[in-house]
Amino acid sequence: MPWQREALGDIVQWASQMTRDADGKVIDWDWIGGLDLAGGIGVGSALLAEAVNDSGTIRAGESSGNNGTIPPTEADTHRALAEDLRIRTRVEAVLELCTQVFMCDFDRAIHSYRLPRALAYANRRLNDEIGMLVRLGEREGRWTAHSERRGFTTVTVLDPAGETELDDVQDRSDVVAEQRKRNRRHDRDRQRRSQRAWERGSVQHVTAASHSEETAGTLTGATTGAASGSGVPKPQPKSDDAWRRQYLPGRDVGTVLGIDIETTGVSQFRDYVIDIGFETMDMASPVGSGPDGEPAAIYGASGHAADDFADGDYGPSDAYDQRRNMFGVPAGAAWLGNPFIRRLTGLDVSAMGPAAWTTADDRRRTGVLKPFDDYPAAQRGLLDRLTAMPYVAHNATFEHKYFLANIEGYAEAYRDGRVTILDTLPMSRFWDPGAVRSDEHPYGDNTLQAYARRQGALGAAAGEQHRGLEDAHIMLVAMKNQLAWLRDHGQGPWGPDGQAGVGGKHTRRGW
C-alpha cells in the first residue's frame, strides 16, 4: 500500500487534537479519509487525459483522481476547475494548522507527521491539475488567463472570452490568505490577553499573600518590597524581533551544515523542491585571507560560480563534503513549465518531468530525476545530515517549512529537539552595521547577495547564484567572515547580549 494511503490511518490521532481548520471551520475528517492521496484528489484528470497530448481534445473516461463529486461524463472544464479550487481551499485550510498542532502536542497524542506530508503531496499535484485546467480552458476559448500580484500572493486571474460568469473559477488565494492572517492575529491577541490575565492574577495573589503576612508581622524587608509592588517582576513584552533572534548562533558554534534549496515557487503545499545544495564548514577555525590580508571573496568581479566549482577547490574557505542534488517534478508540473524559475535559476522545469529522458543513454548519463517528495532514500539521507549537526540557511524558515512538508521524519526530529537551525538573515539584520535601513529596506538590505558582499564573500560585481550549492557556499563564507570580525571586536555572540553554546532555534522537551 502506498505510504500516502497508509497515512490516512493517522486520522484518529489528528482528529483527537484538531477539530477546526485555519478558516475556523469544523474539519470533516471522514471527507479527508475518502481522498485518494496517492492517486489524486482532483476531479479534472479525466478531461486532461487527452488534453496534454491532443491540444485540448476532451475524452470522457475513468479518472483515477475522481472522488465521485463530478461524473467524468458530465464534467466540463469550468465545473472541474471550480471543484478543484474548492478542494484545494479545504485541504490547505487543514494543512495551515498542522505544524502548530503537532508541535504543541506535548502529550504526544499524535505520533507522526505523515498525514500532513501526504496531504501536501496530493495538494501539489492538485495544484498542477488546476494549472492545466486553466490552460485547457484557454485552448477551448472559455477565458484568457494572466498572473497578478496581490499583496504577498500571486494569483491567476481569468478574463471571460464570452459572457460566461467566472466567479466560481477565480483564484481567491489572496483573499483566503488575508483572512487566515487576520485569524492568526486574532488568536495571538487572545492568547496574549489570557497570558496577561494569568500574570495579573499571579501578581495579585502574591500581593494579597504578602499583605496578609505583613499584618501578622512576619514580613521580611524583601517581601515588603514585593507587597508594595516595587519588587514584583513585571512581565516583559516580547519584541516582534524576538523570534528572529532565536536563530542567531552562540559563541561556541563550530561545525555546521550550510544548505540552500531551490523550488518551483514559495508554497510548500503547492510547489516542488528541485535543487538542494549543501556543504560543511567549521565556524571556529581561522579564516583564510587573500593577498591583501582581507577575507578572500568567493566570487570575484566576474561572478562566475562555475569557475569556482569546476575543480572542487574551495581555497581558504574550509568547506568540505559538498553536494548538489537535483530532483524532478511530476508530469503535470513539467507540462506547465515555469518560465520564471528558468529565468531566475536557469533550471528548465519542463525538462524535469518523468518523460524528460527518452533513451537509456540519457538515463545513464543524467539519471532519472525523481520528485523529492516521492524519494524516501534522498529524504533519509538529508535527514541524517540535518540531525548530525546544526544547519544554516539564509531565511531558514523557508527551508524549514519545505523540510516539514517533504522529509519523512523531519517534523518528528524537530519536535524531539534533534534539529538545530541557524540563520544568517538575522545575523545580517542585527549584527551587520552595513545593513542600513531605507524606504526600500526598512530593516536594512538583508538579501543574501547584499549580506555576502558586505562580508567579503562576493565581489562587488558578483551576484547571488540562485543555485543550491553555490548559494550555500556563499552564505557559509559570509557567516564565517562575520563571526571572525564579531569575535575580534567583542560583538554579536561575544557582546553583552551574546549567548554561550551553539545557539540557534530548537525545541526543548517539555517533560
Image (tube, helix red, strand yellow):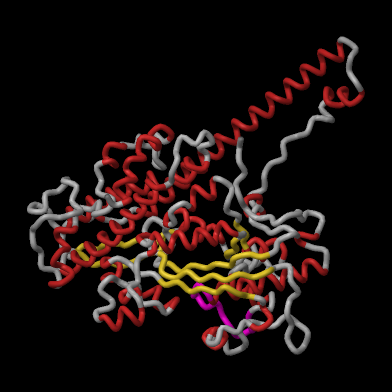
Q: Position of residue 88 (x, y in %)?
A: 31, 51
Q: Position of residue 303 (x, y in %)?
A: 57, 86
In the rendered structure, does residue 463 fall within the stretch colored magenta? yes
User: Does 322 appear above or below 236?
Assistant: below
Q: Position of residue 234 (x, y in %)?
A: 75, 34
User: Does 174 appear above or below 112?
Assistant: below
Question: Toward which corner of the image does residue 349 lie, by quadrant?
Answer: bottom left
Viewer-nearest residue: 51 or 476:
476
Q: Position of residue 389 (x, y in %)?
A: 61, 60
Left or right placement of residue 72 versus residue 31 in this view: left
In the rendered structure, does residue 296 fall within the stretch colored magenta? no
Question: Toward which corner of the image does residue 489 lie, by quadrant?
Answer: bottom right
Which residue is pictured at 59% across the width and 30% down the height?
A: 194
User: Does 171 appear above or below 294?
Assistant: above
Q: Quadrant of the C terminus?
A: top right
Left or right placement of residue 157 versus residue 269 in this view: left
Per the picture, the main secondary structure of the magenta-coloured stretch is loop
Question: Toward which corner of the image does residue 438 lie, by quadrant?
Answer: bottom right
Q: Which span of residues is magenta-colored?
A: 458-469
Which residue is pictured at 60% across the width and 57% down the height?
A: 421
User: Does 91 appear above or below 461?
Assistant: above
